Image (cartoon, rainbow, N blue to C red):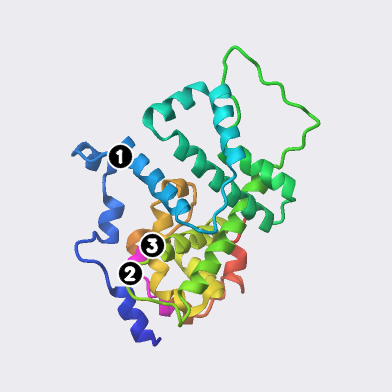
Amino acid sequence: MSVVGERRRASCRLDGMSDAAEVEAADVDGVLAEGWMTTDNETRQSLETEYRKFKADPELIHNLVMHQRILETWERSSPKMYARLKKAGTLEMTAFVSQQRMWAERDLLERAGMPPTDAREEAEKGWLMLEPEDDPDEEKVEDEEDYAWPAADLEKMRAEAEAAKALAVLQAKLSGSQFKTGFDPEILQAGITLAGYHIEKGARSFTAYTRAMIDDMGDSVRPFLKSWYLGVRFDPRAAGFDGMSGAAEVDAADVDGILTEKVGDDEPDDVIEQEYRNW
């Protein structure tokens, strides 16, 4: 697609959407005070949607023995949670979805290089909620001989695995043979995941991020660069990412100019490499 075509696609917005400056200046507390709020029903709907998606997959394998073990462990070790889920009518669905998320997490960790046994153990810890509920009257005794993967290493491996998965999705979705017009939530989710990976690694400014993303994906991502960057910019989990460009700066940025300009004399030869700090 020509640069002109890419600009046309990049400039298209759905009618009625707020612009970047309005979003950045918005008072979320004020919005909520006017009557909108997240409800338990919305959480349940999200769970039901994920459950139906898993059930509709003809290739999905669900371990019924493990499913029963999960329920028995919750009832025995986490009676409050068990009772709450049962009362809400989401007990079976939660156990089903938790198991499927666990398998997905295990696969990600294995692809990132973790030994299979460790990968499954970490995935079970993260998704099956098998640990007993906290009891203030009991002290937890840790076995010093048990090896625990450092949290930082686990997070890095998960991030790299998630980025690799997102990259594969984008390469498939944005290829000339498969690209379709219209909003695609999978492209949005994968794009924000890959953007967050590069930004967390250190490509904080929109300029550095743009170069990193183009280096990964080529010109196919140009129309999406701003929306993905702002998706990370406004994520509360990214509050500690110092040095990110403001919404107005991103909105006004010239992607073509960023990619054609030469690195200044006062900058290192490889800006992307230099900005990938503390990774």
The answer to whether 80 appears left or right of 154 in the picture is: left
Residue 153, image x, y percentages? 68, 48
Residue 91, image x, y percentages? 45, 33
Q: Is residue 251 magenta?
A: yes
First in sequence, mark 1 or 3: give its number: 1
Q: Which mark is residue 38?
A: 1
Residue in front for this viewpoint, 157 or 56? 56
Against 120, residue 58 (above or below) is: below
Query: How far apart are the alpha carbons under marks 3 and 2?
Result: 25 Å
Which residue is drawn at the image coordinates 45% and 40% (left, top)? 93
Q: Tag count in the figure?
A: 3
Residue type, mark 2 in image: Ala
Residue type, mark 1 in image: Thr
Where is mark 3, residue-wise?
A: 185
Residues drawn in magenta: 249-257
The answer to whether 122 appears left or right of 230 in the picture is: right
Which residue is drawn at the image coordinates 41% and 44% (left, top)? 47
Q: Nearer the viewer, mark 2 or mark 1?
A: 1
First in sequence, mark 3 or 2: give its number: 3
Mark 3 and 2 residues: CB-CB less than 8 Å, in contact?
no
Which residue is drawn at the image coordinates 62% and 55% (left, top)? 108
